[in-house]
Image (cartoon, helix red, strand yellow):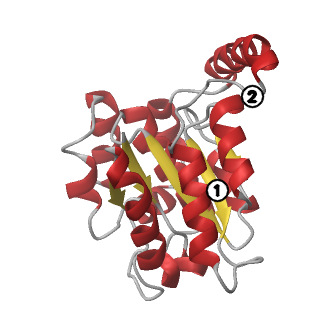
């Protein structure tokens, strides 16, 4: 699985620590991490949590990433923004049990974490445990065992509903504010991390047109 890490501007200074913690946990599992920044608070590309939502949608809908790890001060804004865009099912995680249950019950493809609220002494250890529970036991297996069948059925229903209630990304991009889109996709390493891994040429073309 290719996991994309995205940090918005208020928590950009923690990017290297989050990346190192994520890699420590998931690389031994056979996953890879693609760090889309922000890398420092002074980056030219300033990502707000709304821009994070757009970027997450582009990565997941195009197949350039299989999963997105993001967040903000509380995690709430990033979660709301990500769920505003097509192809993203984002959960809000604050502890390791959230990670396990979101993976097993909700089987989403994106998580938003609080990187400021209650993020103090031992924060990197807490992150390790969240990532272990989120990625270490598969996805969509249900919990507890007596709820597996209805939980899996509800996930299929939710996926079907989202396909109807959300417009296609290629329809949305031309209608969004051009400055907003260009800024969201102006990261220092966006081109090298996105285009070689994009599996949807229509989305790749829409991204190129939006940045023109």
Which quarter of the figure has residue 78? Answer: bottom right
**Position of residue 173 in the picture relative to residue 80 (left or right):** left
62 sits left or right of 205 in the view? right
Tally of numbered discs: 2
* Residue 162 visible: yes
Give yes or no for contact between labels 2 and 1 (Cβ–Cβ under 8 Å): no
Q: Quadrant of the N terminus?
A: top left
Question: Which of the 4 image quarters holds residue 139?
Answer: top right
Mark 2 and mark 1 lie on one chain; the one further toward the N terminus is 1
Q: Identify whether 28 is placed above or below 187.
A: above
Q: CA distance from mark 2 to mark 1?
A: 21 Å
**SS at circle 2:** loop
**Residue at the image point whose x is 54% and y is 52% from the top:** 132
- Indicate the quadrant containing the C terminus: top left, top right, bottom left or bottom right: bottom left
Residue 18 percent across, percent down from the top left: 48, 71
Q: Residue at x 63, y 77 (%)?
A: 123
What residue is at 70 percent from the left and 79 percent from the top?
119
Q: Secondary structure at mark 1?
A: strand
Residue 92 visible in the shown view = no
Label 2: how many residues lie within 10 Å, few (<14), some (14-19) or many (20+)? some
Q: Are there few (<14), some (14-19), or many (20+) residues within 10 Å of tag 1?
A: many
Compared to residue 182, the image places residue 116 above or below, namely: below
Residue 112 circle label: 1
| Residue bearing mark 2 | 143
Judge by depth and name the residue closer to the eye, 210 or 200: 200
Instruction: Report the residue at 39% width, 77% height from top.
Output: 39
Comparing labels 2 and 1, the label whose residue is closer to the camera: 2
Across and down, in percent, residue 201 comes to 26, 30
């Amino acid at each position: 699985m290719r996991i994309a890490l995205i940090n918005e501007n208020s928590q950009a200074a923690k990017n290297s620590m989050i990346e190192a913690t994520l890699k420590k946990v998931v690389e031994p599992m056979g996953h890879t991490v693609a760090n889309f920044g922000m890398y420092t608070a002074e980056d030219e590309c300033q990502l707000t949590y709304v821009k994070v939502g757009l970027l997450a949608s582009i990565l997941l809908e195009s197949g350039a990433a299989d999963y997105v790890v993001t967040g903000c001060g509380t995690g709430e804004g990033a979660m709301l923004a990500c769920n505003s865009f097509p192809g993203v099912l984002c959960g809000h995680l604050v502890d390791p049990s959230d990670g396990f249950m979101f993976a097993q019950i909700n089987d989403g493809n994106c998580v938003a974490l609080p990187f400021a609220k209650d993020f103090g002494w031992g924060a990197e250890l807490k992150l390790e445990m969240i990532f272990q529970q989120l990625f270490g036991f598969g996805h969509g297996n249900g919990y507890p065992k007596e709820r597996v069948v209805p939980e899996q059925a509800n996930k299929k229903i939710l996926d079907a509903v989202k396909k109807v209630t959300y417009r296609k990304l290629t329809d949305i991009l031309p209608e969004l504010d051009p400055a907003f889109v260009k800024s969201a996709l102006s990261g220092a390493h966006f081109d090298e991390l996105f285009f070689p891994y994009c599996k949807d040429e229509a989305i790749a073309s829409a991204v190129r047109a939006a940045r023109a």
